[in-house]
Structures are given as C-alpha cells and as structure tokens.
Amino acid sequence: MNLKVSGIVLRVRPSGDNDRLCTILTDTHGVINAYARGARSMKNKNSTATAQFVYGNFELYRRREYYIIDESQYEDLFTGLRDDIIRLSVAQYLCQLAMELIPDEQPAGEYLKLMRAALYYLSENTRPALLVKAAAEMRIMSMSGYMPDLVMCAECGAYEHDVMYFIPRTGQIKCGDCGVGEDGFCLKLGRGAMTAMRHSIYASQKKLFAFSINEQSLRQFSKASEAFVIAKLEKSLTTLEFLRTML
C-alpha cells in the first residue's frame, strides 16, 4: 500500500545516473529518506516537487530501508529564498537543524508547520532573516525537549531587569544584580532580546514570528539562540558555520 504524506524537502543528494535521494520532513512519519527516480531530469514528473525546500504532497512506497517517491505535487516552492544568500543560508541551516532533532518514523505535524512558516517568511522577506532564524531555533529546541527556563532569575526569582544573563549550558537566566557567578560562558541580554527569547518559546505557534525588535536586540537574540543550540547539540552545524561567515 502506498503512503501519502505532506512534507518539506530538507535535503537533496544525487544518486545513480539521474536519481535524487531526498530527505523529507513529513507530517505523519517525521524525517524520511526517499528516492525520486529520474528526478534530476527536468522532464521527469517528480523533478519540481523534489527540489530542496519545496513543500508538497508525496505518494510513496517502501523498498527495504528507503521509500520510493511514486507521485508528487508541489504546493509551495519558496522561490524567494534564492534571491538573497543570507536568507538562503538561514533556510539551509534550519533544514540541517531539523534533520538533527526531528525523529524518524514519528508524527511531526507541528514541526512541519514550524518549518513551513519559517521558509515562508524567509522567502517572502517579510521578517528579518535573523529573527526567523533565532525564533525557529528556540522553538525547535523547545519542541525537541530542550526548553530553557526563562521565566525568572535562577537566583532571586526576578522576572525583569535591565540586564539578564543567559547561560547556554543550563538554559537558565540570571539578572544583572545576581550576576553569573561560576556558571561559565553566558550572554548579556537587554530587555528587548530577553522579551524576544521568551516569546520564541512561550508564544503560540501561530504568533511565533509576529513581533519586531531593534537591530541591537536582534543580534543579542540571535547569538544567544545559536549558542544554546551548540551547547545542547555539543557541536556546531556546518550550515551555521557558513552562515556565520556572512554575518
């Protein structure tokens, strides 16, 4: 029996003479690998829908440890991603992060909604690329069991302060009065960055990217979110390192 899924193509690799091996984030089966036979030919029926970043509907059948794409139909191509190297690089990074964190063969509908929204805002250029990056980073980490504790200072319980210190290793915050003590590496956050951090993990999915922030606060937010990813994954992803060379 064929399997019908909706999904986003996270990565595409060449296979054989003219095939593609697609890594797809699906609504019902998490991240899967699927071959698209002949899809590197522009005349192939599955060529368009199996390109990287495309959101579409796929009909698959299982062949040993891999799926084979029998039919596909695209819904969103996100063509605007290729208009700007920064937005394209953020999209590639978020796809790699998704492959690191999202489980195989398990329902992943909420992850798919998150990634589709992130790619939409990057493609349409209606939100700053760093805002989309940081908000998506914090949300996907939180959804994957790495939610930080940003409610209050870990020492005195203060909710607000002109300065908060974020500790990536523990995911905790401490206020400017308490300082970080012996907690090690930390990042200084102003009120704007702190508000953005909290919004990114506590707001509803629908409102995740619906906020604005000044440039200084956005830089703080972005640095804190990627430091948190690196601390929890215990490594830096290649796409993030490439992105950093342009920021």
Image (cartoon, helix red, strand yellow):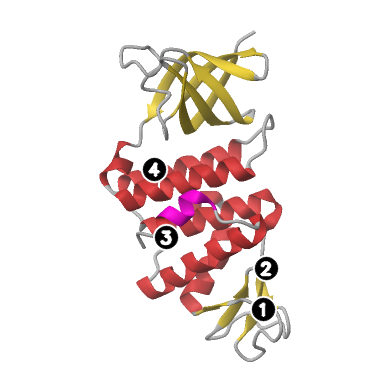
Task: Work out which residue is located at the far top of the displayed protein and give it.
Answer: 1
Q: What residue would you read off at disc 3?
A: 244
Residue 184's label in the rendered image is 1
Q: CA distance from mark 1 to mark 3?
A: 23 Å
Q: CA distance from mark 1 to mark 2?
A: 8 Å
Nearer to us in this view, 145 or 202:
145
- The answer to whether residue 125 is visible is no
Q: Position of residue 212 (x, y in %)?
A: 39, 65
Lower position in the chain sequence, tag 2 or tag 4: 4
Q: Which residues are magenta?
A: 237-242
Q: What quarter of the picture does the N terminus occupy? A: top right
In front: label 2 or label 3: 3
Q: What residue would you read off at disc 2?
A: 169
Q: Position of residue 144 (x, y in %)?
A: 67, 49
Q: What residue would you read off at disc 4?
A: 120
Q: Secondary structure at mark 2?
A: loop
Lower position in the chain sequence, tag 1 or tag 2: 2
Residue 148 falls in image quadrant: bottom right
Q: Position of residue 193 (x, y in %)?
A: 49, 72
User: Is 158 left, or right, of 34 in this rendering?
Assistant: right
What amino acid is found at the position of numbered circle 3 in the picture?
Arg
What amino acid is found at the position of numbered circle 4 in the picture?
Tyr
What amino acid is found at the position of numbered circle 2 in the picture?
Arg
